[in-house]
Amino acid sequence: MTTPQLTKNQSLVFDVLEKAEGPLSAYTILDKLRDHGFRAPLQVYRALEKLLEYGVVHRLESINSFVACAHPGDDCHSHGIVAFAICESCGQVTEFHDHEVDHRLMEWVRGQKFKPEKTTIEIRGLCEACAA
Amino acid sequence: MTTPQLTKNQSLVFDVLEKAEGPLSAYTILDKLRDHGFRAPLQVYRALEKLLEYGVVHRLESINSFVACAHPGDDCHSHGIVAFAICESCGQVTEFHDHEVDHRLMEWVRGQKFKPEKTTIEIRGLCEACAA
DNA sequence: TTGCACACGTTATAGCATAACGCAATTGAT
DNA sequence: ATCAATTGCGTTATGCTATAACGTGTGCAA
């Protein structure tokens, strides 16, 4: 999928996520955009919904937060399953892809005749700096 | 870790999860236990916290729900990373383990000097019956 | 022009999770 | 035996996450 021109709200939300050091919750995004006229959660959630659809933002299920995709300009959907390492101390998120992992999971799934729609892989722990 | 004797509340919560066909939210569990004297969410969450710690219950991050571990009597902690296939139509959950997937993820993590604490793998989609 | 699709704004509500207080029972060391 | 620490429990209150339902305006194609 190619990313269409973002609307005003979508751009605002995306910019906040891109400039952030780590993942943000929808309500944190809302607070950061109050000066730009945002008043209600739905304004954020609706923008996020589209950004997720376009693949330029990821949702981190295990911490109810959102991050900008780590592949600027690239099409995220082409990378297969995305996995995340999330530091529970500093919040830093590292995104990565592993073909072999994808392959194994999809093999298993195929054996079960299960039809996958969306796959989540999230590793929570401590990044190098915080583990020291 | 070996599972200690469960307390009354822990047993009640565990029994509800075991008898359930699929994953349950904490509030659904609460409702099912009102007849047994449960009145507040914390009674459920506190029991769940222990059951998760003992490894006899899993949390499904992507749907904010809980399931009994699929390995009766067995020690879940010995299976490495647990992965789940979750049917978005009927709610059925299949639990599985894949050593190769674990291995690849842990290899990557090691390369990053990231210290993993808890890993989530959840595949949402349609089970064989529902996809038909 | 009419009808449709889409983004947007607002209010209200639903659903998920924990903080903070206090009490009772258990355990284990002195 | 006694004291202190730990653990489970009950209750109230609160905070965080997400969506339902309604209405508005705009652009565009039939």
Image (cartoon, coloured by chain):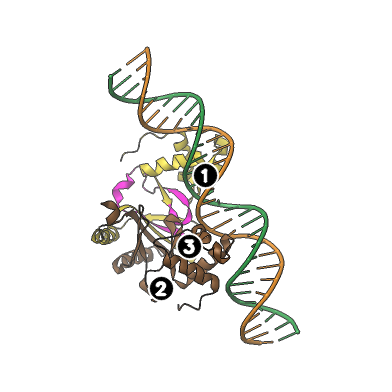
Chain colours: A brown, B yellow, C green, D orange
**Badge 3 is on which residue?**
B129
Residue B70: in magenta span: yes
Identify residue type, mark 3: Ala
> Which contiguous range is marked in magenta?
B60-87
Identify residue type, mark 1: Ile
Work out whether C24 lies above or below A92: above
Coordinates of residue A113 in the picture (x, y in percent)? 41, 65
Residue for point 48% across, 38% down: B12
Work out whether C23 lies above or below B97: above
Work out whether B46 lies above or below A30: above
Quarter of the rendering occupied by the N terminus of chain A: bottom left
- Which mark's residue is nearer the viewer, 2 or 3? 2
Instruction: Determine whether, in the image, residue B34 is placed left or right of residue A95.
Output: right
Crowding at mark 3 (Cα within 10 Å: few <14, some 14-19, many 20+) = few
Crowding at mark 1 (Cα within 10 Å: few <14, some 14-19, many 20+) = many
Which disc number belongs to residue A77?
Answer: 2
Residue B61: in magenta span: yes
Identify residue type, mark 2: His
Q: CA distance from mark 2 to mark 1?
A: 37 Å
The chain to which mark 3 is attached is B
Residue C3 position by quadrant: bottom right
- Which mark's residue is nearer the viewer, 2 or 1? 2
Residue D2 position by quadrant: top left
Which disc number belongs to residue B29?
Answer: 1
Which residue occupies the foreground of this view, A101 or A56? A56
